[in-house]
Image (spheres, grey):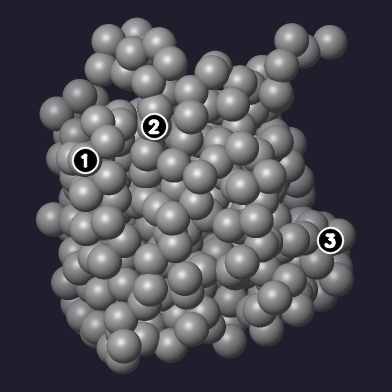
């Protein structure tokens, strides 16, 4: 028996997608998915929340009973709601109105204060843009300044990638018996990509190839084909303006000695339609109910296999599809 919900975070199962590979005509065992949607808060961000809060309590930057605040598209906020409730901290989530209402309601019921920020006048509801995220950042900074809360900054603090380097990556390698030779990840804060890639490359002697996934309308990190057309429907990522917005890459290099060029073997882009189609495929064929980004990851993994870059590709099911029931994902 586990003592609390925090103890249930992590150690999620790794599943071979046997029905998807059969349907798509891919070799058996070539696609494996880690079910991060089975974390208590329904996403991989539970790991981030736990690591950031535990690190902050350990180094004294978060005092006992002090309030916590962070901007979120919903998943990090849900994780922080659970972690803060379990450790006796009040949590404030700052979120764009363009994100799904299910997430805001879930955080409220977990005891968080939710501050919704209006989208930019040119934005489309349900398509959170980089400009929308800037407005959320401004509001979050104002709350920190005026209320003296601890900022659990998922973009800046090392816990956002160390939780994956210390836990998710090792779980992937162990549960696959070291047979993974490819990893794809749809990038939001960059923590999952950086942490898992760094660990997998260390363990494999650099043989595991890692591919960074972006929305087709916002390939701002791919030096070979930059596009920035604004909004997309793949919630949870694709909001940055480039690597300068993702300090996790530099932090990893300083701490582990693995630079950005060594972490990234290639860039892939996925359309909204591909993400939706593959999320539905994952649900109907495998019974795995993931969100938009899970579909994006599956689409990218299939592309890597069909190009012949790798023989067994892993990805994470970032969150549960239950958080998108008000969208056109289903």
User: Residue 239, which numbered label?
Assistant: none
Q: Which numbered disc, 3 or 1, marks the residue closer to the eye? A: 1
Q: Which circle's residue, 3 or 2, is located before the other in the chain?
A: 2
Residue 92 screen position, x and y as percent:
44, 42
Q: Which numbered disc, 1 or 2, marks the residue closer to the eye? A: 1
Tell me: 87 left or right of 287.
left
Which residue was labeled with disc 2? 68
Tell me: 17 left or right of 221.
right
Residue depicted at x 68% and y 45%: 109
Q: Which circle's residue, 3 or 1, is located before the other in the chain?
A: 1
Q: Residues within 10 Å of mark 3 (few under 14, many from 20)?
A: some
Residue farthest front in this picture: 146
State how far apart marks 3 and 1 are (Cα): 48 Å
State how far apart marks 3 and 2 are (Cα): 38 Å
Q: Residues within 10 Å of mark 1 (few under 14, many from 20)?
A: few
Residue 223 screen position, x and y as percent:
17, 72
Which residue was labeled with disc 1? 146
Residue 244 appears in the rendering: yes
Tell me: 266 left or right of 6.
left
Q: Are marks 3 and 2 in contact (CB under 8 Å)?
A: no
Q: Which circle's residue, 1 or 2, is located before the other in the chain?
A: 2
Task: Note whether 218 is above or below 319 in the view shown.
Answer: below
State how far apart marks 1 and 2 are (Cα): 13 Å
């Amino acid at each position: 028996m586990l003592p609390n919900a925090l103890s249930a975070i992590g150690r999620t199962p790794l599943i071979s997608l046997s029905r998807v590979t059969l349907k798509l005509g891919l070799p058996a065992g070539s696609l494996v998915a880690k079910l991060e949607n089975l974390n208590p808060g329904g996403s991989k961000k539970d790991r981030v929340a736990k690591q950031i809060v535990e690190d902050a309590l350990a180094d004294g930057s978060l005092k006992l009973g002090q309030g916590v605040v962070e901007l979120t598209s919903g998943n990090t906020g849900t994780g922080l709601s659970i972690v803060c409730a379990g450790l006796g901290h009040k949590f404030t989530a700052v979120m764009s109105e363009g994100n799904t209402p299910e997430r805001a309601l879930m955080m409220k019921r977990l005891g968080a204060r939710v501050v919704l920020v209006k989208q930019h006048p040119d934005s489309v509801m349900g398509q959170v843009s980089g400009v929308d995220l800037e407005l959320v950042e401004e509001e979050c900074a104002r709350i920190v300044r005026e209320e003296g809360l601890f900022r659990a900054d998922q973009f800046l603090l090392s816990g956002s990638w160390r939780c994956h380097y210390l836990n998710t990556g090792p779980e992937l390698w162990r549960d696959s018996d070291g047979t993974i030779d490819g990893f794809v990840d749809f990038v939001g804060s960059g923590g999952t990509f950086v942490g898992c890639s760094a660990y997998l490359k260390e363990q494999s002697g650099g043989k595991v190839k890692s591919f960074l996934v972006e929305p087709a309308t916002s390939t701002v990190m791919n030096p070979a084909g930059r596009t920035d057309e604004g909004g997309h429907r793949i919630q949870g990522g694709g909001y940055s303006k480039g690597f300068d917005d993702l300090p996790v890459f530099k932090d990893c290099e300083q701490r582990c000695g693995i630079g950005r060029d060594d972490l990234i073997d290639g860039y892939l882009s996925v359309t909204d339609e591909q993400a939706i189609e593959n999320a539905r495929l994952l649900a109907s064929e495998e019974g795995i109910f993931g969100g938009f980004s899970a579909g994006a990851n599956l689409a990218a993994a299939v592309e890597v296999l069909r190009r012949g870059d790798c023989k067994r590709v892993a990805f994470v099911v970032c969150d549960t599809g239950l958080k998108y029931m008000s969208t056109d994902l289903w």
